[in-house]
Image (cartoon, helix red, strand yellow):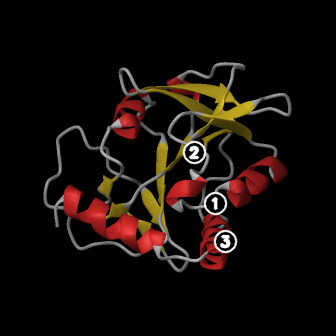
Amino acid sequence: MTKKELRIKYKALRGALSLEETEDKSLAIANMLLKLDIWDKVYFHLFLSIEEHTEIQTEYILQILAGKDKEIVVSKSDFADCSMTHYLLTDNTRLKKNEYGIPEPVDGLEVPDNKIDVVFVPLLAFDTNGHRTGYGKGFYDRFLAKCKSDVIKIGLSFFDAEEKIDDINPTDMVLDYCVTPNRIYTF
């Protein structure tokens, strides 16, 4: 399937999930992450969920990261050039939803791309080769291309892999893992 077809399919599948299913699947994904060999890393980039899009509730992952005393990094998006600026999430970080419903830091301590060790990557769909389909603006592909070469890229999905995404671009970044409620895919 093409990315466009996958976006339509997976937006519909996510939209059909109840709040209870979303919470249960999100918690299962967070628990699966504990099985990965990533916990010796320091800087973890986490996306903050857009509730209106029935995204994975990353609050559970946030609690794990805080409990393990990790440095948590969140982003602010610039829709003019599809870039992101990253900030350290602290007790003093004030978050505000932007016009697209994305919770973002108002300000704070900026963290350079090359400092980040692990990135939890949002997606709508992924395939058995580690390619992903997001919302189509390329924010994460641009961001990941600027990270250090050994950054660990972990997709999070309510659903299992598609066999193949047909229209992969050379600029598409491949995941290292994708975690679902029932399985960890390694690429």
User: Who's the residue at 60% across and 69% down the image?
Assistant: 29
Which SS class for mark 3?
helix
Quadrant housing the N terminus: bottom left
Q: Please give the label number shown on residue 23.
A: 3
Residue lying at the far left in this picture: please name it: 166
Q: What residue type is labelled 1?
A: Gln
Disc on the earlier residue, 1 or 2: 2
Mark 1 touching mark 3, by CB under 8 A?
yes
Q: What residue type is labelled 3?
A: Glu
Q: Disc 1 designates what residue?
A: 57
Looking at the image, residue 135 sits to the left or right of residue 24; the answer is left
Quadrant housing the C terminus: bottom left
Q: In this view, does 82 lie above or below 110?
A: below
Q: Disc 2 designates what residue?
A: 47
Of the pair 95 and 70, the residue shown nearer to us: 95
User: Who's the residue at 61% across and 53% down the image?
Assistant: 38
Graded by Cα atoms within 10 Å as few (under 14), some (14 to 19) or many (20 or more), the crowding at tag 2 reads many
User: Who's the residue at 33% across and 63% down the image?
Assistant: 126
Mark 3 touching mark 2, by CB under 8 A?
no
Q: Which one is closest to the eye, mark 3 or mark 2? A: 3
- Which percent across, then down, holds residue 133? 31, 54
Disc on the earlier residue, 3 or 2: 3
Q: What residue type is labelled 2?
A: Phe
Residue lying at the far front in this picture: please name it: 99
Graded by Cα atoms within 10 Å as few (under 14), some (14 to 19) or many (20 or more), the crowding at tag 1 reads many
- Which percent across, then down, holds residue 64? 76, 56
Q: Residue 57 falls in which quadrant of the image?
A: bottom right
Q: Residue 170 falls in which quadrant of the image?
A: top left
Image mark count: 3
Label 3, label 2: how many angstroms apart (C-alpha)? 16 Å
